[in-house]
Image (cartoon, rainbow, N blue to C red):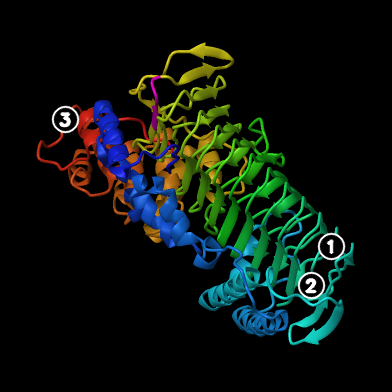
Amino acid sequence: MAGCAGLPERSSLLESRVTSVLDRRGLGTDALLVVDNLLRHGAPAPRAAPPLVLELLARPLAAVDAARIFRETVPASLVALEPTPSNAWFEDLLKTYVDELTEAQRLLRAATREVEEDPFPGGVPSPRDLLAAADAIDAPRLQRANLAFINATSRFATGVRNARFPDEARQLQSAIGTVVIGTRGNDRHGPDAALIIDPGGDDVYERAPVRGGAVSVIVDLGGNDEYRGDDLAIRGLSAIVDFSGDDRYAMERGLGAAIAGTALLLDYSGNDRYEAKFFSQGAAAFGIGALIDFGGDDRYRLEAWGQGFGTAGGVGLLWDRDGNDQYAVAGVPDPFDRGSGLSGAQGAGFGFRGRVAGGLGILRDDGGDDVYEAQMFAQGSGYYYGLGVLWDRGGADRYQAFRYAQGNAAHQAVGVLVDAAGRDAYRARGAAQGSATANGVGLLADEGGADRFELGPDERGWGRAEWLRGLPSVGVLLHAGSAQFTRDGKAVPAPPEDPPVAVQPPTADLCPSSDPGEALLCRVRDASDLEQVWRELAAILRQQPETPVAGWIAIALARRPASNAEEIAALLANRRSCNVRALALRAWPALPEARTAIRSDCFRLQAAARAAFARLGVAPPADAALPAFLRRLPPQEDTY
């Protein structure tokens, strides 16, 4: 929906610049309302759709305010987290913390029935698994449990570092399970204790998934430590708090990753290494997963689905507060074979079309010269009602991806990349850097220096956008005069602010198909007795007034009409859905229907009416209230 880099000091200045570009193109600011208009006239939002995403879809330019998104998404106790001097006795802090963990655990168990023991072994949850988890969760109660755990752990981390710590190691039983106090030597800790507090040494921690409403917390005060195993929280409460040392985290899954619970990883200092395969480094579904690193030159490595990744009902956060950092995501095979792998990372909110909405994924880096490497759906990427934000607040940074990245979103989603300062470099194959498809809004605004923008041979980028459904997409690139541009390895002039209008090509037929709508198209396309097929389809429209394949029937009518085409068009014109009526008017233009449609408040139906008037050779009524892009630009094709 919106991808943004380099927010100007005043958002009103950015709004003014974007408005000027849209006016020159003949689109006007009405083009920013297309997504919201389509949603209001289409199917209701899917399960678990974040309210913030729905708000931003209606006000696209508000998505550039990464600070506000961060403030409204991340719990306040994590934002304010700092270790402070304390004269408290360790025993008093421990007792209070265990009591608070006990209450958080009680709330969690009350909020969740049994979630399948390990529903997501494949790295990322499936829609079926997410919907099953949703049925086992009381979302408001779960939120209270998560906040209780986060607030308690934040308070304990704030006070324990400078508390008067006991000299002896010991083990005791509590309401949450075993509590272990380690030594100042090099200890080895297994995954069985509910709470481990270790005062120092180069320690090794073996981790296991946190399940069944369990609590698992590690607080390590010093040493170069190693964490390994799998500490994904599945209906559990998990935290690692490490105060110093050059630490290594090597996990299958986990590292601030939770499903139906909360997982925290707080590392206060050191040059650390984070390595994992899937669903890691700040990832969540129906819960909160946060990795916060306070300082050091850190390295983050991942296969896919993490580094600030949120799916259904989840908030995933990776926040690195200082240092020259490197973020790399390899990607998993793409089932559509688009030339690269799927990353789902570095600020990514990802949903599953037609099933369940995406969550909120944020990667925030506060300083340093950083490197971001990923493949597809990454670096401020939203997909299907998800919100993905990459917010870099300073430094000379480098961004490299393949496509659908660097402030990009698809299918009613929000993707944001904000880079506040520095001489930055952006590199992608295409569909990035101020591009848009599928009636989205893509904006990259970095006017702060001699930045470098590089694309491959794919022309979708640098302000280029493709219309869909007869309505515009909006792509805008705002850059400094000293910016440098490279396409396919060769230096090129700065792109024009008013690229030519382009229409997104129609989706290729996939025959045979298990999808009912696509199967209908295949049947009409290949029918040897076309008249009989259309008689059957007319019967369906008469007997099932709101059949879900009505839109597909309209598309088939445009491709291969029969002798009863006028009857079919009339039946489709009576549907409640303005999208179906628009497709029917495109397929079989009729003046009475066009005169009614032009006065609709549904943009897609108005666009179909404009096209119908043009095909019929009749001027539309001069007093029709049309959006600017339908008044100023000629009708475009309706594709789907």
Q: Which residue type carries mark 1?
A: Tyr
Q: What is the C-alpha distance between the residues marked 2 and 3?
A: 78 Å
Q: The C terminus is located in which quarter?
A: top left
| Span highlighted in magenta in the image | 476-481
Q: Which residue is mark 3?
A: 618
Q: Which residue is mark 1?
A: 205
Q: Nearer the viewer, residue 282 or 122?
A: 282
Q: Which residue type carries mark 3?
A: Val
Q: Residue 196 has which mark?
A: 2
Task: Please indicate whether residue 431 sits to the left or right of residue 482 in the image.
Answer: right
Q: Nearer the viewer, residue 568 or 165?
A: 165
Task: Please indicate whether residue 539 sits to the left or right of residue 619 in the image.
Answer: right
Disc 3 crowd, CA 10 A, few/some/many (<14, 14-19, 20+): few
Secondary structure under tag 1 reads strand
Q: In which image quadrant can residue 253 be found? A: bottom right
Q: The N terminus is located in which quarter?
A: top left
Q: In which image quadrant can residue 445 be found? A: top left
Q: Nearer the viewer, mark 2 or mark 3?
A: 2
Q: Earlier in the sequence, mark 3 or mark 1?
A: 1
